[in-house]
Amino acid sequence: MGAWWDKANGSAMWTARWAGAYRWFESAKRWLCQAGTDLVFPPQCANCGAALESSTAPLLCGVCRSKLAPAVWHGCARCGGAVAPAFASKSGCALCRHVRFYFETVVALSAYQGELKQAVLRMKHAYAEPLAVALAALFVELRGPCLKAYQPELVIPMAMHWRRRLLRGINSADVLAGEVGRRLGLPVGRRLLRRRRNDVPQRYLRPADRYRNVRGSFAIRRASRVRGRRVLLVDDVLTTGATASEAARTLKRAGASQVVVAVLARAEGDDR
């Protein structure tokens, strides 16, 4: 019995040592590969192109990070619009208090203006996908605790009609949702929400007409994936909230228990 136990114990010890050596080897291999990549292709800020120390560091330089978003964003509890902390209320702000939304709340990185507005506009093109990834990473870094407070179970990008996607070459919401889901450790349902119509772009319509324009625009491909789950709906910009609300209505009709909207930018004033 003693000999058998010593042999088994020794075998387990060697297995643990080999496992530790393998982990060290894999870590060293990744470091060497990354160092070689950084040497051949020096890492740059995804927004301004400034040199970065390493591609494993934040994907944005310190200057851009400070320009793109504040560390803390004081947003309306319903629509995500900027409000002074003293005026924060669960019933909403002056812009949304009398508007019916099908989502619970909006979590925004910052206002749709200045450096962030320009970055979001560039991000809508296929060549700027690294910028979308960097902005999503910054979003989770700064707003992650707020998102986690709602305990989302599934990340879904805002759907884009196939014709518009074909012309643009990318749906930036897909890229954002993928990175947000990866950093939060959540599954991403990239094709669950479908755009049924290629509607007139909302920016060409008055705020009152936007709700009618998107009514019935969405459909769900597999309701079983959504039923009973708390959904994080990801998009780049929220203006009146009409599109996000209609998407949330569709998700809830399919059985979603909660829909929280996550956007990079909240449009206000002349940008609405």
Image (cartoon, grey):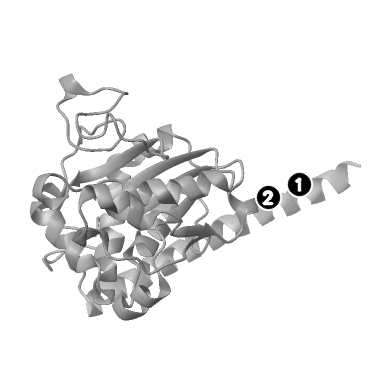
Image coords of residue 152 (percent x, y): 48, 41
Q: Amino acid at mark 2?
A: Met
**Rendered residue at 16%/61% (across/down):** 119
**116 relative position to 9: left or right:** left
41 lies above or below 22 = below
The answer to which image quadrant residue 145 occupies is top left
For disc 1, the marked residue is 9
Callouts 2 and 1 close, C-beta under 8 Å? yes
Q: Secondary structure at mark 1?
A: helix
**256 relative position to 38: left or right:** right
Farthest top residue in view: 86
**88 relative position to 137: left or right:** left
Q: Amino acid at mark 1?
A: Asn
**Rendered residue at 22%/23% (across/down):** 88
Closest to the observer, 74 or 101: 101
The answer to which image quadrant residue 99 occupies is top left
For disc 2, the marked residue is 13
